[in-house]
Amino acid sequence: MPQNPDAFTRLINALKILPNVGPKSAQRMAYQLLQHSRSGAQELAEALQHALKQVHHCTRCNTFCEGGLCDICADQNRDPRRLMIVHMPADVSGMEAANCHDGLYFVLMGQVNPAQGMDLSHIALDKLVERLQNSEVEEIIIATNFTAEGDATAYVLSELFKNLPYKVSRLARGIPLGGELEYVDAGTLAQAVYERKMLKE
Ligand SMILES: [Zn+2]
């Protein structure tokens, strides 16, 4: 790669940071943006700039939000005794749509990859520990995916809570093996929450 790529190449390289976007797709996107969607490209650039400035992590649950606390953490009607731990903000949306959890959430913003040596730097464990200090939490519901990464993350979490005074449960395996919560329908999700399996009383 040259030290100072031309503008078109720079855009292609920038687009390659998106998930599942290789050189070919990045090239097609760059072409589309500059050839057919110049006003859309302008809006994309502005929205990205705006989001970078405005969107931060909720100081309590770590999800994306504008301002200090997200709407769910700020809601006095939620039950602070039950904390559900999920991978991504999309999982919170899924749970809310399924209407099966009236407690609070913690968003790890990632998962542990057992194929890459169980690197814990992709999940916000320190923030989670901090969140639990002086909290009213009694039960922790581990709602990670039913994939190798989700299982590894659940294992790390259950080890973390082993000697701490919480009830710990994990979603029931009503969800198909290899299932990412993001793609599970609301009914199945709700069932997995109601039938959650106690790991520690
Ligand atoms: Zn929050």
Image (cartoon, grey):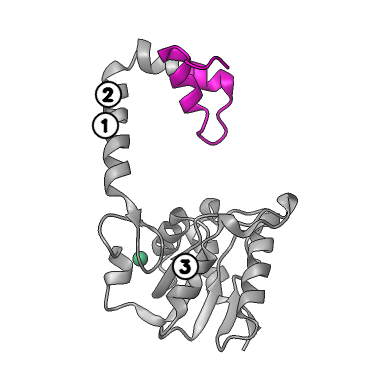
Name the residue beneath numbered marker 2: 42
In the displayed structure, would residue 117 be above or below residue 33? below
Return the residue nearer the eye: 197 or 43.
Answer: 43
Q: Specify start and end residues of the magenta stretch as a single range.
A: 1-28
The mark closer to the camera, 1 or 3, is: 3
Beta carbon of the mark 2 residue lies under 8 A of ligand 1: no
Write the residue at 47% across / 27% down: 15
Give the residue type at disc 3. Answer: Lys
Dot 3 surroundings within 10 Å: few (below 14), some, or many (20 or more)? some
Q: Residue 20: horizontal and vertical position, in percent?
A: 57, 33
* Quadrant, the C terminus: bottom right
The mark closer to the camera, 3 or 2, is: 3
Please report the residue visible at 67 percent of the width from the left and 75 percent of the height from the top: 159
**Cβ–Cβ below 8 Å for labels 2 and 1?**
yes
- Residue 142 horizontal/vertical position (percent): 57, 71
Residue 29 visible in the current orientation: no
- From the image, tell me which residue sits under label 3: 127
| Residue 159 falls inside the magenta stretch | no
Image spot of residue 4 (x, y percent): 47, 15
In the rendered structure, which amino acid carries the disc numbered 1? Glu
Residue 76 occupies quadrant: bottom left
- Front residue of 145/46: it is 46
Q: Residue 46 carries which label?
A: 1
- Distance CA(mark 2)–CA(mark 1): 6 Å
